[in-house]
Amino acid sequence: MRTQAGIKRKAHFLGTKIKSLRKRNRLTLEDLSVRCIQIDAEAGPSVSYLSMIENGKRVPSERLLEIVADIFQKQVSWFFDESLEENVIDTAPTAAVGGMPLEPGFLFSESLLQLAIPELLAQTGTTGRQFAHLLIRAHQESNNNSFPDLERAAEAVGKKQFPLNVDDIFAIAKGLGLKIQWFDKSTFKDKGDTELPLNTLVRSFFDPPGTVYLNRQLEKNPARLKYDLANHIAHIVLHDGDGARAPQVSGGRVSGRRHDAESPNIDAKDILYAWRDFECSYFAAALLTPKTPFRQFLSKRSYAINAGDKIDLTRTLVMRRMSSVSPYPHWHYFDAYPPGNLRAVYRGNGIPLPWGNMTMVSDPCQHWAVFRMLNTRSTKPSAQISVLRTGEHKRLYCCESIRSRDAAGNPHVLCAGVDLSPALASQNIDPVSTIEMIDTNCNKSGGSGEIPAEARKQLQSIGKILNIGWIAEGAAKAATIICQRSSSCPRDSHCLGTPPPKLKPQIDQIRASVVEDGSKIS
């Protein structure tokens, strides 16, 4: 047993090491305090006391050191070593999806793009809404889904109160001068983005200057009712209720497109409506789940995707909001409808798309978790560890997926996931070695296989550090090799049986043979 006097002599190094670990894992003092209290309410420190410990003004108790060691997966003895770790890898987010320099650069000037883009979209049949959603997604990913101005605007209205019940949201609406009218319309069939008929429900719409029309069908679902009303509150706050926005619709054609526009080509108003739909959606989420209290709420529940069930928050909102409030920046999110249409996408970790969200692809990889869940009737959440090969590189992901139904009754799959490589690297674990261990074992078993004990232990440790419970759940199951296209399956045993032959284009063959003949003559 160490004496208190002995600990005091180490106070400076203890505080520095705790602060270093906290900063490296992008936790605030409040985050770490909540994590400690979550483990032991009596021994957990207040924010001010934790600050004094980090600055060497107070000495942590043996119990508190044990708690901090458990959170960051360190031995208690490590805190008494008067050396700091070197070569600590910074896991701060970079651009999620990298671009490339295009030459000659003058062709990509603003004036030429303004002329070329509408024609490009018209010739490819891309609608203004589809193009706008692509731009908005790139904007989200480049900003790591962080929009402080919208957060502050929502917090100014909601006063950071959490949770908010239905009556609270109605009170906010009334305080802003909004009038509520109810209508009663059931679902109907409408064509979807893939031209297939889908159940469609008009949930609500805004009529300027300040009337919100709500479908009585929402009364059966308080979580969706709160979200829709919060969305219209956003419109009055952000856009003065001018009415230039789409109705809130489930199923059929996605929200963000004006429903009085039938042209398949670009329409400038569609782009405006899609952007406003995004702004109002983000505001609504921030109003219902203000960043700091919701971050603590998720932390106490280890980021369980059903964490909001008891306080009337939809799982869609909870899963989409994780990427905005989590201290770990490397997230992705998919909302997938059968047979393979992505309604919502976020890739803060740069994960490639499993299929297009503007057009279907003919050979998607069937081993992605979202595909597996689309083809099952289970409504239970499922975690999966996946190795994804992109070119010469291999990446490691963990996701949690769940099959659900939208307000119109259409089945869809929600999926939230994280890139595990930066988390491994931040703990000075070589992610390449870990991925190779898992990949090799998967290939021995035909593409899916048990995670080796050493790698499983590493992933379980990362799950505890990130406080994401479903990482350990995924690590306890078989991992799977996934790819972008099944026709180029990277498995040793091709998932389609015999891989299609890779033939050089005939022009390349002619060129190669001519060059070879010429070298023989010389």
Image (tube, grey):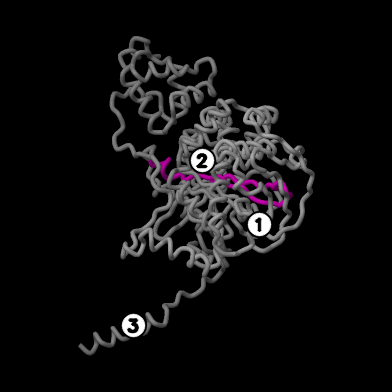
In this view, the mark in front (3 or 1): 1
Q: What's the amino acid at mark 2?
A: Ser
Magenta-colored stretch includes residue 342: no
What residue is shown with label 1? 260
In this view, the mark in front (2 or 1): 1
What residue is shown with label 2? 323
Distance between the alpha carbons at the discs numbered 2 and 3: 49 Å
Asked if residue 355 shows in the view, the reply is: no
Specify the segment rendered in magenta: 399-425
Which of disc 1 and disc 3 is earlier in sequence?
A: 1
Give the quadrant of the C terminus: bottom left
- Looking at this rendering, what residue extends furthest in the bottom direction? 521
In the picture, the disc for residue 226 is: none
Q: How many marks?
A: 3
Query: Does residue 331 appear left or right of residue 252 in this picture?
Result: left
What residue is shown with label 3? 511
> Residue 12: x percent and y percent?
31, 18
Q: What's the amino acid at mark 3?
A: Arg
Which of disc 1 and disc 2 is earlier in sequence?
A: 1
How many residues crowd around disc 1 within 10 Å: few (fewer than 14), some, or many (20 or more)?
few
Distance between the alpha carbons at the discs numbered 3 and 1: 53 Å
Distance between the alpha carbons at the discs numbered 2 and 1: 34 Å
Q: Nearer the viewer, residue 314 or 132?
A: 132
Q: Secondary structure at mark 2?
A: helix
Quarter of the figure with residue 104: bottom left
> Residue 143: x percent and y percent?
44, 44
Query: Does residue 448 appear left or right of residue 20 in this picture?
Result: right
* Depicted 498 relative to depicted 289: above or below: below
Q: Residue at x 37, y 11 (%)?
A: 3
> Residue 445: x percent and y percent?
54, 57
Q: Secondary structure at mark 3?
A: helix
* Depicted 394 relative to depicted 170: above or below: below
